[in-house]
């Protein structure tokens, strides 16, 4: 058994990252342009469809912060996958990164339904990410104890969902660990399979940004306004749970070891909770929060929305410019360091 485990680890260390579009295409693009890209944005569709590197760079440049950024956002990318991909990006030598923006959210236990059954839910299940998820599933406290461990393992009443998540994440970790199905990855690498097949994912500017083109349907406007009112009524600060904070701290420490500065971003989503790092330890990095309809009403006009989580092209352009302005001002004020 020890020999098998050691062999699995060795093989995994030699295997290339699976070809998963559009992630592979963006990773190869960064590899080819890492000598000029100094700023990255990682996150879900709320980054992919909302952050224009061109507009962000323009606004930052006006404030004497010249940058060359790239949007590494991918639809359905939650925090655990974001953390794993960050490790792959920073492993590339010769990069000139100065700043890395990470979308901030509470660590989800599930997946984007559109990715279920695809490689997207499995390739990032190394021990570091799986361990954080398992701790949240079991609600492990600061002393390493869980009151519901037995019920979750056995799938007892009221714990069926967590039991299902436990089995799912353990099976994905096992698949990742023993390199199941990785022969195709070797074939793709040896035959130099094109990673440009998903070039449309790079957007019209070729910088990784692809804005949404739809608009909020007229018959959904009243529903959206009611949901926003309810979210505002429930707004307030909330400290990140220790499982999310663990992932964020890993990301921040990795970014700093590579000579760059981490910045966490909360995009203009419907949820008005103001996420903060726990006061028990120094913050992992600066947080730029834009999910505040009172402070940023321009991002919550129905005319600039697709739905509660996304903005259309007009809203994305306004947000990109505001992000550039806020970042430059915070940097010059010494709030980002």
Image (tube, rainbow, N blue to C red):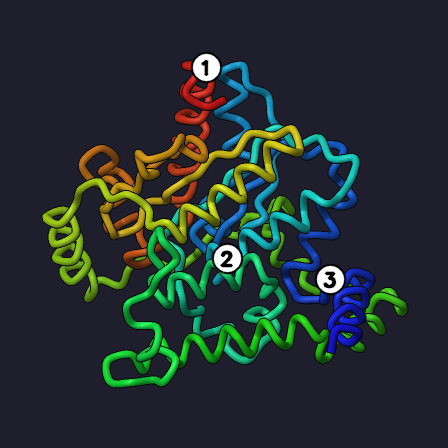
Q: Please determine whether, in this image, residue 224 is positioned above or below residue 59.
A: below
Q: Which of the marked residues, 1 or 3, is nearer the chain's N terminus?
A: 3
- Of badges 1 and 2, the one in the foreground is 2
Dot 1 crowding, Cα within 10 Å, few <14, some 14–19, many 20+: some
Write down the residue under mark 1.
332
Q: In the structure shown, which secondary structural element does the residue marked by tag 2 occupy?
A: helix
* Residue 183 placement (x, y as % from top left): 80, 77
C-alpha distance separating marks 1 and 2: 31 Å
Residues 271 and 168: in front is 168
Q: Position of residue 4 (x, y in %)?
A: 77, 76
Answer with mark 2 or mark 3, whichever residue precedes in sequence: 3
Q: Which residue is mark 2?
A: 80
Residue 78 location, x and y as percent? 47, 58
Q: Which residue is mark 3?
A: 17
Occupied quadrant, residue 294? top left
Q: Height in image: 105 above or below 3? A: above
Query: Badge 2, how many Cα within 10 Å: few under 14, some, many 20+?
Result: many
Comparing 209 with 250, the one in front is 250
| Quarter of the figure that contains the N terminus | bottom right
Secondary structure found at label 1:
helix
Gap between marks 2 and 3 measured at Cα: 16 Å
Report the Cα–Cα distance between label 1 and label 3: 38 Å
Image check: 86 left or right of 13?
left
Please name the residue shown 54% across and 47% down the image: 42
Q: In the rendering, at what x and y percent does residue 262 appear?
A: 52, 34
Which residue is at a point 60% across and 39% down the rendered structure image?
254
Label 3, residues with CA under 10 Å away: few <14, some 14-19, many ≥20: some
Labels 1 and 3 touching (C-beta < 8 A): no
> Left or right: where does residue 152 sit relative to residue 336?
left
Q: Residue at x 74, y 38 (%)?
A: 34
């Amino acid at each position: 058994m020890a020999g098998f485990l050691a062999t699995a680890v060795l093989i995994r260390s030699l295997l290339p990252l699976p070809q998963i579009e559009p992630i592979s295409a963006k990773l190869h693009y960064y590899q080819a342009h890492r000598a000029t890209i100094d700023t990255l944005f990682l996150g879900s569709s709320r980054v992919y469809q909302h952050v224009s590197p061109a507009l962000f760079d323009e606004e930052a440049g006006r404030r004497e912060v010249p940058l060359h950024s790239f949007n590494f956002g991918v639809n359905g990318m939650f925090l655990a996958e974001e953390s794993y991909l960050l490790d792959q990006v920073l492993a590339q030598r010769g990069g000139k990164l100065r700043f890395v923006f990470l979308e901030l959210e509470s660590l989800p236990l599930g997946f984007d339904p559109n990715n279920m059954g695809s490689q997207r839910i499995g390739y990032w299940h190394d021990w570091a990410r799986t361990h954080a998820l398992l701790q949240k599933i079991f609600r492990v406290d600061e002393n390493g104890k869980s009151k519901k461990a037995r019920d979750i393992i056995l799938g007892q009443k009221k714990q069926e969902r967590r039991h299902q998540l436990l089995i799912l994440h353990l099976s994905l970790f096992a698949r990742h660990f023993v390199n199941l199905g990785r022969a195709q990855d070797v074939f793709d690498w040896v035959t130099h399979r094109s990673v440009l097949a998903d070039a449309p994912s790079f957007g019209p500017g070729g910088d990784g940004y692809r804005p949404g083109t739809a608009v909020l349907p007229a018959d959904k406007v009243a529903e959206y306004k009611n949901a926003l009112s309810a979210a505002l009524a429930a707004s307030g600060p909330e400290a990140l749970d220790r499982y999310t904070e663990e992932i964020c701290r890993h990301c921040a420490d990795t970014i700093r070891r590579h000579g760059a500065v981490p910045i966490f971003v909360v995009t203009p989503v419907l949820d008005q909770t103001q996420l903060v790092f726990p006061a028990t330890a120094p913050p992992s990095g600066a947080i730029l929060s834009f999910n505040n309809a009172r402070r940023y009403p321009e991002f919550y006009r129905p005319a600039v929305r697709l739905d509660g989580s996304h903005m259309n092209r007009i809203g994305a352009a306004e947000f990109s410019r505001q992000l550039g302005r806020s970042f430059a001002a915070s940097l010059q004020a010494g709030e980002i360091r």
